[in-house]
Amino acid sequence: MEGRRPNRLVLEMTELTPADYAAFRPTAAVFENCVPDRADLPRTIPEFSTLGVIEPGIEGRPDPVVGITQYQFFLTPRPGQGSLTDELTTGLQLVLISPKEPGSEARTSLRDWADFVHIRHIAEAAVPGFRMITPYFSSAEGAPTFLHFYEMHTDDPESAFQSMTPLVAERLGGEDSAAFKDWAWHPQLQIDYVNTFRRVWPDVA
């Protein structure tokens, strides 16, 4: 984040308050859920109120803790898309997806769609507030397989997210166009989690 693309990210999801989690993980960037229990998108991962984003150093991945769900992701060989700046990442759109079917063919097909169609058009739409979109992958078995890490510089991440689809639709010929439908869905797409988060620690003031 902020002018760099970490080789690894550890995400921790918890019902601890942001303050209690920050006291427990003082090196994490801490974000609060903007839309708890949103119902407009499917998910396989249970809801949570606080998100911790950790960039593991030489000491490696922090030990898992009971009551905190933890996932580790690695940077994909393909580049992220958007603008890599030193502005503080004050908001996130967190996207976790997996292929519906097992095997390398389904995984590769979904990854190609995400990089060359879905993320590409979001970056080209220049959504206000969006900065860098970086794809990561999990080496663990099971879902989620891919993390799309949307960094934002905005006080209102949810409004930025809500403006994204109309802007993409406009540049692709409308929501009824074949190009938009190709952008919005892929036969192998399983959405594990999508939501927006506002940064609360370290202090963004």
Image (tube, helix red, strand yellow):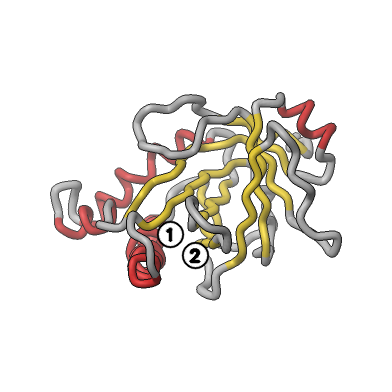
- At a point 43% along the width and 51% down the height, the residue shown is 97
Q: How crowded is mark 2: few (under 14 residues within 10 Å), some or many (20 or more)?
A: some
Q: Is residue 175 above or below residue 112?
A: above
The quadrant of the rendering that contains the C terminus is top right
Q: Which of marks 1 and 2 is nearer the N terminus?
A: 2
Q: Which disc is residue 87 wearing?
A: none
- Give 137 or 164, whichever is nearer the viewer: 137
- At a point 34% along the width and 71% down the height, the residue shown is 105
- Give 36 or 107, whichever is nearer the viewer: 107
Q: Position of residue 193 (x, y in %)?
A: 46, 41
Residue tagged 1 = 123
Q: Residue furthest bottom?
A: 77
Q: In this view, does 2 lie to the left or right of 158?
A: right
Amino acid on which the number 1 mark rests in the picture? Ala
Q: How far apart are marks 1 and 2 (CA)?
A: 6 Å
- The quadrant in which residue 69 appears is top right
Q: Position of residue 59 (x, y in %)?
A: 85, 60
Q: Which disc is residue 81 wearing?
A: 2
- At a point 54% along the width and 33% down the height, the residue shown is 156
- The quadrant in which residue 126 appears is bottom left
- Give 66 or 175, whichever is nearer the viewer: 66
Q: Position of residue 184 (x, y in %)?
A: 28, 51
Q: Residues within 10 Å of mark 1 (few under 14, many from 20)?
A: some
The quadrant of the rendering that contains the N terminus is bottom right
Disc 1, disc 2: CB below 8 Å? Answer: yes
Q: Is residue 203 left or right of residue 194?
A: right
Helix, strand or loop at label 1? It is: helix
- Give 66 or 170, whichever is nearer the viewer: 66
Amino acid on which the number 2 mark rests in the picture? Gln
Q: Where is residue 111 in the image (x, y as percent from the top left)?
A: 40, 66
Helix, strand or loop at label 2? It is: strand
Q: In this view, does 66 lie to the left or right of 80?
A: right
